[in-house]
Image: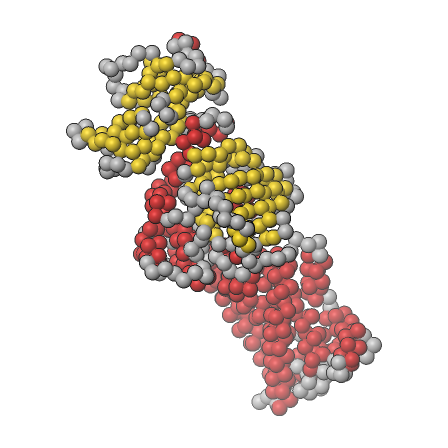
């Protein structure tokens, strides 16, 4: 089998991943055929056992699928008669549990990557990574003395210093408690906005996906249930995974006005304006907001005399049964976005909701995701 | 004082044990690596063969080796082809026999240490562009170091302590195959209890000191590892 060299097949863009894998001992099978963007953060999202990690391991060459095909920006890493071993793939990998080499110091772990990256370290990159992950003060420590969160930050820095063309992250926060998660999430957000390396981010946490992802691949039973822009995927109600207390939509917007007196900011999301609490973001800042279905109520008339700040004129797209038999999820069209409201069937009946009906949505709260 | 032949026996024992330890580390490591990581059906049979010297009387091992290395045995034919002659009753014959005899004492600690490392550090190293040799020297060796040290000490001391195999394969040739254990036996046969006492006491003290340092080393290592 010819190995060792990356074959440049063509100049096409994007990542193409096609894997068919059957585990000999279990019934689990992975069956995916994906084209993904080659920039930004793509979340591979799904419940445990849905094949997210297996997909990532196949891409890294850590798992060998019976049939595998992976092309990144025209470079073939793997096809039917070619398999580039993991150590020859230009990738970085962050494992679920912080996997530092215990016999090396924190800095020793970073040096391990720098020595092997095969690319001279550009001036400033080292300091930038150290600064980005906030690990200056713990570099000299033995890796066994570090907390879980610190270890994972070192592991992320190590994966960056190998200067990957593709960064694979397998639930990097899953093994940490909530406080540690909140400690690392901002670093990941900074990472995303600083680096132009594409990132594949495996997660089962809605929060992480909403905060970090641009693109989402939803996995179910080893197959891709749906994929698309994060706003699109969360406004669809095609997957049971999206039916829970977290059901809601994500909107992308820009801060267009600051109200100093009431400490509010006005966010313009594709034609719909929302007032949110001023979080100190500056004018013109791109933000992402999340509106939970439980925070949306519907009225036939526009109540000016209400405590609700955000009211939008909407029309009903469709009405979908919730898992709870008393509840319905009503998808609504705003100017250019989709909104979801969770109502009782009694209210649906009372308001005589039907497709195309126009009415007012009252939004009780809008969460700034980032 | 120790006689010249006693000193010669001690020096020979040291030479045999050192040579055997070096050879065992070189051939035991790949065997241990394979046993630790294989999913082959041969794992069971190979493990059993490696462990055989633990339970067999040394005379059984020595007997078959004597036959195999003799003029009509397959090892003997090979060595004769190569113009080395036959191995029994030579220094190198003793080395070959000791390698078989001490094999499990070297393979098992290394195998356990490699198994304890698991897949993950090797996968991590692979994602950091480390090829297989690089992974072995920069990840496996340092992480399995306690196992290698234990293996070397056990291999060395076990070789120093062998007797039955030496009698079967090596005989009693001064400077060639007459190691300390055989020398003690000779002294007792000749009723030279004084001489026997001295050598026996040296053996006890040596073995005790080595095992003591081994166990304190292991204790220190587990304490450090558990922190």
Q: Horizontal and vertical percent for residue B32?
A: 62, 62
Residue at the left extreme? Answer: A261
Query: Considering only vertical position in the picture, is B125 above or below A266?
Result: below
Q: Nearer the viewer, residue A303 or A317?
A: A317
Quadrant where the C terminus of chain A is found in the figure: top left
Q: Horizontal and vertical percent for residue A294?
A: 38, 22
Q: Nearer the viewer, residue A121 or A156?
A: A121
Residue A369 located left or right of residue B74: left
Query: Considering only vertical position in the picture, is A32 above or below A266?
Result: below
Residue at 51% of width from left, 54% of height from top? Answer: A89
Residue at the right extreme? Answer: B72
Residue at the front extreme? Answer: A10
Q: Horizontal and vertical percent for residue B131?
A: 54, 61
Q: Is residue A190 visible?
A: yes
Q: Nearer the viewer, residue A35 or A117?
A: A35
How many circles with numbers are drawn on the protein?
0
Residue A70 located left or right of residue B81: left
Residue at 60% of width from left, 77% of height from top? Answer: B18
Display coloring:
secondary structure
Residue at 47% of width from left, 19% of height from top? Answer: A320
Q: Is residue A365 visible?
A: no
Residue at 45% of width from left, 44% of height from top? Answer: A38
Quadrant where the N terminus of chain A is found in the figure: bottom right
Residue at the bottom extreme? Answer: B4
Residue B114 located left or right of residue B80: left
Q: Horizontal and vertical percent for residue A238?
A: 50, 26
**Quadrant housing residue B78:** bottom right
């Amino acid at each position: 089998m010819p190995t060792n060299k990356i074959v440049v097949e063509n100049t096409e863009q994007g990542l193409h991943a096609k894997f068919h894998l059957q585990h000999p001992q279990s019934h689990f099978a992975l069956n995916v055929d994906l084209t993904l963007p080659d920039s930004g953060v793509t979340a591979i999202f799904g419940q445990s056992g849905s094949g997210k990690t297996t997909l990532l391991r196949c891409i890294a060459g850590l798992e060998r699928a019976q049939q595998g095909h992976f092309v990144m920006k025209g470079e073939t890493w793997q096809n039917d008669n070619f398999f580039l071993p993991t150590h020859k793939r230009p990738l970085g990998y962050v494992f679920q549990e912080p996997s530092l080499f215990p016999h090396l110091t924190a800095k020793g772990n970073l040096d391990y990557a720098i020595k092997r990256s095969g690319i001279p370290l550009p001036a400033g990159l080292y300091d930038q990574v150290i600064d980005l992950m906030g690990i200056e003060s713990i570099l000299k420590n033995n890796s066994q003395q570090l907390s879980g969160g610190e270890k994972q930050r070192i592991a992320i820095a190590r994966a960056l210093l190998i200067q990957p063309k593709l960064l694979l992250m397998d639930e990097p926060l899953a093994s940490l408690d909530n406080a540690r998660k909140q400690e690392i999430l901002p670093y990941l957000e900074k990472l995303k906005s600083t680096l132009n390396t594409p990132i594949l981010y495996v997660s089962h946490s809605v929060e992480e996906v909403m905060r970090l992802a641009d693109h989402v691949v939803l996995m179910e039973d080893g197959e891709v249930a749906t994929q698309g822009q994060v706003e699109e995927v969360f406004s669809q109600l095609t997957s049971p995974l999206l039916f829970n207390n977290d059901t809601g939509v994500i909107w992308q917007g820009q801060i267009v006005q600051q109200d100093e007196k009431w400490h509010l900011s006005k966010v313009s999301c594709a034609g719909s304006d929302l007032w949110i609490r001023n979080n100190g973001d500056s004018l013109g800042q791109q933000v992402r907001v999340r509106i939970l279905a439980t925070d949306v109520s519907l009225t036939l008339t526009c109540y000016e005399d209400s405590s609700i700040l955000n009211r939008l004129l909407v029309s009903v797209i469709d009405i979908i049964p919730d898992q709870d038999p008393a509840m319905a999820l009503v998808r609504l069209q705003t100017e250019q976005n989709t909104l979801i409201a969770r109502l009782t069937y009694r209210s649906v009946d009372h308001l005589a909701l039907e497709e195309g009906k126009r009415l007012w949505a009252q939004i009780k709260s809008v969460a700034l995701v980032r | 004082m120790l006689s010249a032949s006693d000193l010669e026996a001690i020096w020979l024992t040291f030479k045999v044990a050192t040579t055997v330890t070096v050879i065992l580390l070189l051939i035991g490591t790949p065997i241990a690596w394979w046993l630790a990581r294989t999913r082959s059906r041969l794992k069971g049979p190979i493990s059993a063969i490696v462990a055989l010297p633990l339970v067999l009387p040394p005379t059984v091992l020595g007997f078959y080796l004597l036959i195999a290395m003799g003029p009509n045995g397959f090892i003997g034919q090979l060595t004769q082809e190569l113009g080395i002659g036959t191995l029994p009753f030579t220094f190198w014959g003793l080395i070959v026999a000791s390698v078989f005899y001490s094999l499990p004492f070297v393979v098992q600690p290394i195998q356990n240490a490699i198994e304890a490392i698991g897949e993950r550090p090797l996968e991590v190293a692979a994602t950091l562009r480390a090829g297989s040799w690089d992974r072995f020297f920069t990840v496996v060796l340092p992480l399995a170091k306690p196992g290698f040290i234990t293996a070397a000490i056990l291999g060395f001391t076990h070789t120093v302590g062998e007797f039955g195999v030496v009698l079967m394969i090596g005989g009693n040739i001064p400077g060639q195959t007459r190691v300390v254990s055989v020398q003690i036996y000779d002294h007792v046969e000749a009723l030279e209890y004084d001489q026997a006492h001295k050598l026996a006491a040296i053996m006890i003290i040596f073995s005790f000191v080595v095992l003591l340092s081994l166990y304190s080393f292991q204790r220190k290592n587990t304490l450090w590892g558990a922190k």
